[in-house]
Structures are given as structure tokens and as C-alpha cells.
Amino acid sequence: LRANDLKGGEVAKAMESALAPRITALKNRRMIPTLAIVRVGENPGDVYYQRSAARRCEALGITVEVFAFSESIAEEQLANEILNLNMDERIHGVLILRPLPGHIDDRAICKALDPKKDVDGVTDRSLAGIIKNEPQGFAPCTARACIEILKHFKIEIAGKNIVVIGRSLVVGKPLSLMLTALDATVTVCHTKTKDLPAIARGADILVAAAGRSRMITKEYVREDAVVIDVGINTDENGKLSGDVDYNGVCDAVSAITPVPGGVGTVTTAVLAAQVVEAAERS
Ligand code: NAP
């Protein structure tokens, strides 16, 4: 038995087709949905994400402006740049590439952003919306991407046992709350979790968002499990790898997202959707 590949490209394409008429409608109102990407330093991962997000957005007719700052920018100066973007009427959404350098307080920068432009769900208002399950702000793009994949492939969420490995504010924590709101029974695991393989094996749907190259091996999965691999890592040979040992696991589960070509691909489509949504709300 070989697992079904849950291809991100297919999900992204469907989402982008649904966006096209909305972008046309905005343009008819003389609005061009515009995303500002804020990058500090030259981290290759950030540069790669910026380029691929810009390419996908621009192909859809969303304008992307990159605001790149030196690694040594002071926190106060960066906060001021965010305040300027808040006031810039041309900009509908702002994506801040993180983590920021160590001398900058990440939360302070996120707090400076106008929640209306918070297309990656980093402000307190967006996070509160997720906790309260109220439509305010936006979800973090990666967390929503996982849900879009499950929905696209008609994988039932309600009533399922879902194990999320990782509790970061970007992925694990918001995703576990979003899945709970969709009536899943969610177990959140982290570095202090005891006997993780046994807990993971109890999952109907296993989400790996630990940032540990290929840590999820066959002993973590059940035969009928669906596996969502959020990880984007580099392995010991410098090659891109997920959190799941794809080759070791793909024969043992019912469906799995590949890396690359899985969650990451859908994340940029979600970003585009949230920029369009922000423009529509403005
Ligand atoms: P993070 O902030 O480093 O958080 C990792 C989480 O995983 C933490 O909660 C950590 O537990 C837990 N963890 C780490 N090692 C573990 C282990 N051996 N066993 C159990 N739990 C473990 O990372 P992140 O920002 O959430 O990102 C996670 C992964 O997703 C990374 O590979 C990242 O590159 C990728 N990512 C992908 C996308 C995309 O678009 N596909 C977007 C964002 C991130 P503690 O809390 O106990 O430390």
C-alpha cells in the first residue's frame, strides 16, 4: 500500500482560481491588492520565501513591495517602519519575515502592526480571534494551509483524533486551536512529551511541526493515518527535508504531504488569499 500524496500544488491552484474573480472585482474598483514584505538581514530561507511568495502573488495580479533592512537595524527604527506601512494606504497586507535578529523583540514588532493589515496572523488581535473562534484578524498562513489541505482532499476533521507535534505561536498553537474549533480532539505535543511515538500512533491525523529533520519514522504512525508535514529543514547533506521521513513512512500511512510541494506551497496561496481579503475589507 502506497500513500496518497496530498499535493500542495493542487490545493493552491484551486484556491488561486477562486481568488481570480475577487482580484478582478477589486481592480474594477481601482484597487490593486498590495502586499508589503518586510525582511531584516539576508537569511537565505527568508530570501527564498520572499521570492516564491512574490512570484505567486504577482502571477495573480497582487503587487508585492519588498522592504529589506540591514541585520543591524534598531528595534525602534523597525517599529517606525511598520508604523509607516500602517499609514500607507496603498498597502493592504504586511508580512514580516521572522524570526527577527536576536536584538529585536519579536512581539514588540508584531504589536506595532495594524491588525487590519496582519495577513500572517501575528498580532494579539488575530491571535485572540483564534482563541475565541471569532472572525477578527487573520490566521497564521501556515496553520490555515494545513486546514485548507485537509478540506481540499475532503479529509474529515470533526471527531477525529489529531496529534500536533509543536506548540509555537506560528504553527502548532494556533493550528491546534483552529482544529479544536472544527470539532477535532486535539493533543498538542512538544519536547517534554513522554512517549511521543505512542501518542502519535493514536492519531487519525498527525501534524508534524517540530522543525526536526525526518524525526517522524514508521514507529510514529498508524496504517490508516493522514500525515501533514509542516517541517522545512535542511538535512545533514544540506538538502531540504521535512519533519517526516517520507520514504520510510509513505508505504505505512493512507495519505501524506510531500516536502517540498506540500504545506509550503499552500502557505503562499493562503497569504495571497489573506491579502485579497484585507483589500476587500479596507
Ligand atoms: P519552533 O518555533 O522551533 O517550534 C518547534 C516546536 O516543536 C516547539 O514547540 C518544540 O517544543 C517542538 N519540538 C521540537 N523538537 C521536538 C521533538 N523532538 N519532539 C517533540 N516536539 C518537538 O518552529 P516553528 O516555527 O513552529 O516551525 C516548525 C517547522 O515548520 C520548522 O521546520 C519550520 O521551518 C517549518 N515551517 C514551515 C512553514 C511552511 O510554510 N511550510 C512555515 C513556518 C514554519 P518546545 O515548545 O518544548 O520547545
Image (cartoon, rainbow, N blue to C red):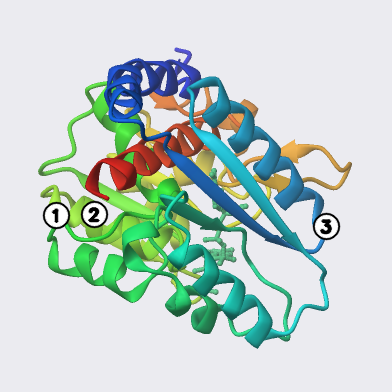
At a point 32% along the width and 47% down the height, the residue shown is 278
Q: Residue 181 carries which label?
A: 1
Q: Which amino acid does label 1 sit on?
A: Ala
Residue 132 vertical position relative to residue 250 in the rendered view, above or below? below
Q: Disc 3 versus disc 1: distance between alpha carbons?
A: 37 Å
Residue 5 % position (x, y): 47, 18
Left or right of 209, for residue 136: left
Q: How crowded is mark 2: few (under 14 residues within 10 Å), some or many (20 or more)?
A: many
Q: Disc 2 versus disc 1: distance between alpha carbons?
A: 5 Å
At a point 61% along the width and 35% down the height, the residue shown is 54
Residue 91 % position (x, y): 47, 51
Residue 261 % position (x, y): 58, 25
Mark 3 vs mark 2: which is more N-terminal? 3
Q: Which mark is residue 42?
A: 3
| Number of marks | 3
Q: Disc 3 versus disc 2: distance between alpha carbons?
A: 32 Å
Q: Nearer the viewer, residue 253 or 91?
A: 91
At a point 81% along the width and 37% down the height, the residue shown is 239
Q: Which of marks 3 and 1 is in front?
A: 3
Q: Mark 2 points at which residue?
A: 178
The reply to whether callout 2 and callout 1 are in contact (CB within 8 Å) is yes
Q: What element carries label 3?
A: loop
Q: Which amino acid does label 2 sit on?
A: Met
Q: Is mark 2 on a helix, strand or loop?
A: helix
Q: Which of marks 3 and 2 is in front?
A: 3
Left or right of 176, for residue 76: right
